[in-house]
Image: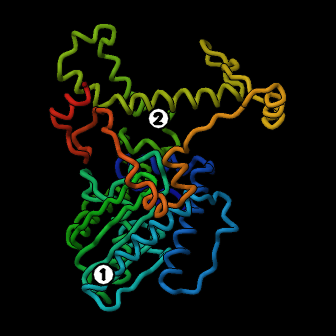
């Protein structure tokens, strides 16, 4: 089993945090998902648009993309625009910055078999920048990290850059960018080469060594989200079942510190319970008997067999079968295009105050002021 099978940079947050998980995940076959395939198509489109903007001779992949739609086009165009802005910014300090698209990087000097593909690299004298496109909508991705000092995937890529280009560009600063347009997220983090190498030697190398051998301690946390064995992992179960010590039938008797402890875990607890339930359903559908549970047909709503025939039947009876309403902002933006939408409707839109949400203090959003809280109550 090759090292690349389980020490991939994209999963580095998980195997760095829970080293034994690497071999467990490597033993489970990959299950292709439409989300992953959609992401692959989006990356291909992004690469094409950037290279075209750079004046390179590239072929338009659009007709061969299985998941292409207008939203993907708009997101890819915004990514292209951002990359070109960064390219122009780099020209201010370097007359001829180099831009590499879908560049393979090798950080095997620190992690055996460690390789990956960087979406975009901009090289200037003294600085190397990596821009990573994230197509996902569900998870907000940051270029920063309290645990590692930066996004571990991009830090691994940066190590590859140092090994490949440091002698040419004398790199002393690494600029890491996560561009996630479907979440309106552009996260940027800079790190010195000295700090990156220190992290590699003191964190990456020893933990990668443990992961290669399947050793170390299991550790549950946010990194469990994309683990293939998350539903049956005993450590994750123990981590979440600690919640059972609280008496939920009498929440009024909980002390402030107990409520704080629950809030720190509640999202992970809900996610874990959902993962276990989904796994159990899959097993039950294959014939597994869990004793106290059975598979039944869920509730469903009636549907029309043919909407065109339904509409005609209602019209013939003298009624109007259609609802008429103005398109929502997302649908209207797709119809008009982002620039035309702003030109025509920018002054006719507003963003209402968001509903108060309780989050961890590590969240980068500013805390609501008391006046804002009172305004919402009113």
Quadrant that contains the C terminus: top left
Element type at marker 1?
A: helix
- Residue pictured at 26% horizontal, 44% vertical: 363
Residue 116 in the figure: left or right of residue 268? right
Q: What element carries label 2?
A: loop
Q: Which residue lies furthest to the front in this view?
A: 318
Mark 2 and mark 1 lie on one chain; the one further toward the N terminus is 1
Nearer to the camera, 340 or 55: 340
Looking at the rendered image, the quarter that the N terminus falls into is bottom right
* Colour treatment of the image: rainbow
Q: Can residue 108 be seen in this view?
A: no
Q: Residue 207 placed where, x, y %?
A: 34, 55
Identify the residue under disc 1: 90
Quarter of the view holding residue 284: top right
Extreme residue toward the left, this view: 370
Quadrant in the picture for residue 356: top left
Compared with 102, 144 (above or below) is above
Residue marked by disc 2 = 233
**Which-is-in-front pick, marks 2 and 1?**
1
What residue is rendered at 35% in x and 91% in y? 96
Q: Which residue is drawn at 43% across and 67% down?
A: 112
Disc 2 vs disc 1: Cβ atoms closer than 8 Å? Answer: no
Nearer-the-camera pick, 344 or 267: 344
Q: Which of the 4 image quarters holds residue 327?
A: top right
Name the residue located 24 percent from the left edge and 22 percent from the top edge.
259
């Amino acid at each position: 089993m090759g090292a690349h099978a389980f020490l991939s940079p994209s999963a580095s947050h998980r195997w760095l945090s829970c080293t034994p998980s690497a071999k467990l995940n490597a033993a489970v076959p990959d299950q292709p998902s439409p989300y992953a395939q959609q992401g692959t198509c989006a990356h291909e489109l992004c690469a094409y648009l950037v290279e075209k903007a750079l004046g390179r001779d590239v072929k338009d992949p659009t007709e061969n993309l299985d998941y292409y739609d207008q939203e993907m086009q708009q997101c890819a165009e915004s990514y292209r625009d951002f990359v070109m802005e960064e390219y122009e910014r780099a020209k201010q300090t370097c007359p001829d910055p180099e831009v590499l698209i879908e560049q393979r990087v090798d950080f095997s000097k620190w992690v055996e078999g460690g390789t990956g593909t960087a979406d975009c690299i901009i090289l200037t004298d003294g600085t190397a920048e990596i821009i990573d496109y994230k197509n996902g909508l569900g998870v907000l991705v940051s270029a920063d990290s309290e645990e590692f000092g930066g996004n571990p995937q991009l830090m691994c890529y940066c190590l590859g850059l140092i090994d490949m280009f440091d002698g040419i560009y004398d790199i002393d600063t690494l600029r890491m960018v996560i561009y996630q347009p479907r979440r309106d997220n552009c996260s940027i983090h800079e790190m010195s080469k000295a700090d990156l190498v220190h992290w590699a030697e003191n964190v990456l190398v020893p933990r990668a060594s443990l992961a290669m051998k399947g050793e170390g301690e299991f550790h549950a946390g946010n990194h469990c989200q994309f683990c293939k064995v998350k539903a049956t992992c005993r450590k994750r179960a123990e981590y979440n079942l600690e919640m059972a010590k609280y008496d939920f039938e009498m929440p009024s008797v909980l002390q402030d510190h107990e409520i704080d402890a629950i809030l720190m875990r509640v999202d992970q607890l809900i996610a874990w319970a959902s993962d276990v339930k989904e796994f159990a359903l899959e097993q039950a559908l294959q014939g597994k008997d869990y004793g106290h549970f059975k598979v039944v047909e869920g509730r469903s709503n009636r549907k029309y067999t043919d909407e065109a025939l339904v509409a005609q039947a209602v019209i013939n009876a003298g009624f109007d079968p259609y609802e008429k309403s103005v398109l929502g902002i997302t649908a209207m933006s797709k119809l008009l295009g982002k620039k035309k939408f702003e030109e025509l409707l920018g002054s006719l839109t507003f963003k209402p105050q968001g509903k108060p949400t309780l989050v961890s203090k590590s969240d980068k959003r500013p805390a609501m002021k008391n006046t804002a809280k009172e305004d919402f109550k009113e």
